[in-house]
Image (tube, grey):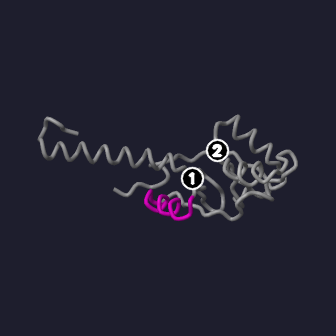
Amino acid sequence: MHRKIIPDIVQRLNIASVKVNDTAYQCAKIMADAHISALIVVDDNEILIGIITERDLTQRILAAGLDGKTTKVGDVMTANPDMLGPDDSVMDALELMQTRGYRHLPVAEDGKCVSIVSIRDLYTSAKEALEQDIKETEAFVFGDRYAV
């Protein structure tokens, strides 16, 4: 079965965003308050131009000895990030995440971010698919006793 990123893995959301002149500290506060680990960076037209993650905050700011209250998002974000489209498959997402070492990927449509998919989302989806395959195999091998 070909599972699409939207709606099979994640839903369309109003994604939390920041701008290049916001500070890393502001990002950390938004992430902590919303219990999320990535923010998209948008321009004045709400077009996706970057992403900033917890990993960016720790490696590019804290570990580098920078001040989060003065460091601008534009100085540490990942500009022009790889993106997925809503119709991309789970395998497309997993391949991109695995080869590039990502844990989050924006899902964009017409340049605007409509969701973010995480490796955790994909893991959950893969686990559910495997469990369903096991049930179907048991139903086939053992008959109605394990019917789906």
> Residue 12, which numbered label?
none
- Residue 8 position, x and y percent, is 44, 49
Disc count in the image? Answer: 2
- The secondary structure type at the circle numbered 2 is loop
Image height of 7 relative to 30, above or below: below
Residue found 73% across the figure and 49% down from its top: 57
Along the line of sight, the residue nearer the viewer: 19 or 29 = 29
Q: Amino acid at mark 1?
A: Arg
Give the residue displayed 49% in from the left and 59% down from the top.
93
- Residue at image x 52%, y 63%? 96
> Which residue was labeled with disc 1?
103
Residue at image coords 83%, 53%: 72
Q: Which residues are magenta?
A: 88-101
**Residue hosting label 2:** 37
Q: CA distance from mark 2 to mark 1?
A: 10 Å
Residue 24 in the image: state x and y as whole percent: 79, 48
* Relative to 50, 73 lies left or right: right
Badges 2 and 1: C-beta atoms under 8 Å apart? yes
Query: Is residue 5 found left or right of 71 in the rendered image?
Result: left
Q: Earlier in the sequence, mark 2 or mark 1?
A: 2
